[in-house]
Amino acid sequence: MIMNNLEIGKKIKYLRKGKGITQEALANHLGVTTQAVSKWENEATAPDISLLPDISVYFGVTIDELFSLTDDAKMERIDNMLDNERYISNTEFNEAENFLKEIISNYNNSEENRVKAITTLTWLYLHRVQEYQEKAAFYAKEGIKLAPFNSELHKGLNNAHKVPIGDWNVMNHAERIDYYNEFLGEYPEHRTGYMWLLDALINDGRLKEARAVLSKYEEMMERKVDEDWRIMHYKALIELKEGHKDKANEIWNGMLKKYPDIKGPYFEKAVVNSYNGEWEDAILCFEKDFELMEKPRYIDSLDAIAQIYEITGDYQKAIETYERYIQLLQNEWNVVEGELVDHPKREIERLTKRIGR
């Protein structure tokens, strides 16, 4: 007998991910195929009713609980979906969107829950943007194969790769700058707001304004360690943008000498090195940033190092770095499947083919 309620697949997926096990492990326990578990979780089929007792015992829930998801469980499921799925189906996207909007519009919910829903909805939309950018890039490349001199396809490809098309009126951050100027007028002690504003001003070459904002930030802060090195970093960025590379490097070297055991300065310096094509220095700083992280560590530095090795033509070291990336996810985050793992695996496969050419 097959159950009619396919919602149980969502609950099984939620419970399985919460327990940190693979579809294969669950399938082996229940004596079914991995494909069967995959079909349940994708709501193509539902498990036979005779399996329900074993499923409920395995996950430590009642059979009734298998048929329902609490709001907290639904929220966690959406978070897991955003973290682990490369593509989200229209059905899953619409369900998540409607659920989050219901929480936001219901003023009987706590402010904390409504803010959480708004935050998650923001990232749901950004995930969809990333999906469509990837699809746009794929089809632009397919079009360019057929029409290599089609300028609109090339513009589309560059926009899909997050590369501005070159017009200043498109590239500048005036809207973001106006927003954070107003935001800081209302919340003048919001340190992250100053960082977003400074990043945009420096990027756009509005350096006089950047110096004024940095001065205000410096006056307001108590010069704690975190604020102090950031102030030094922004001073160096402004000097670099003004063409004073030696002065900028002097400030950065002083920052690293003053704070040799803090990861943040190394990461920011590595980013600057990368933008300037200073690859060896970038790798050293990214590795130092990774070394200083507390466990569980994030993958950003390893991802950057792998990309640099590919840029510089050392595909084998790029592959080895992506393998470190996968081991980190498995050993420190207990992540063994999903998009976080699939991405470096795809990169290893692609680079392996490139070596074999």
Image (spheres, rainbow, N blue to C red):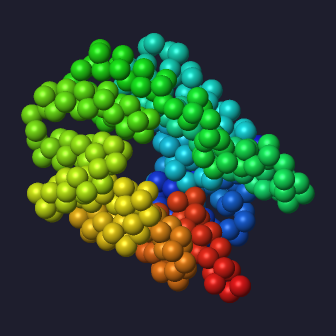
Residue at image coords 23%, 52%? 247
Q: Depth check: 45 or 105 in front?
A: 105
The single residue placed furthest to the front in the displayed view is 243
Viewer can see residue 2:
no
The location of residue 109, given as percent across then percent down, is: 43, 19
> Residue 350 sits in which quadrant?
bottom right
Left or right: where 238 falls relative to 342: left
Residue 95, placed above or below residue 266: above
Quadrant for residue 196, please give it. top left
**Is residue 339 visible from the viewing direction of this image?**
yes
Give coordinates of residue 290: x percent, y percent.
Answer: 31, 66
**Which quadrant of the rendered structure holds the C terminus?**
bottom right
Residue farthest along the bottom direction in this orientation? 356
Rendered location of residue 245, percent (x, y): 30, 54
Relative placement, left or right, of 26 versus 35 is: left
In this view, the residue in front, 104 or 10, is 104
Q: How many marks?
A: 0
- Identified at 51% across, 74% down, the residue is 312
Q: Residue 146: image x %, image y %? A: 90, 57
Quarter residue 164 falls in: top right
Q: Residue furthest right?
A: 146
At 48% from the left and 80% from the top, the residue drawn is 317
Q: Nearer the viewer, residue 214 or 336?
A: 214
The vertical placement of 201 against 14, above or below, is: above
**Camera-side residue: 86 or 235?**
235
Vertical relation: 34 (above or below) 66:
below
Query: Residue at horizontal 88%, vertical 54%?
Result: 147
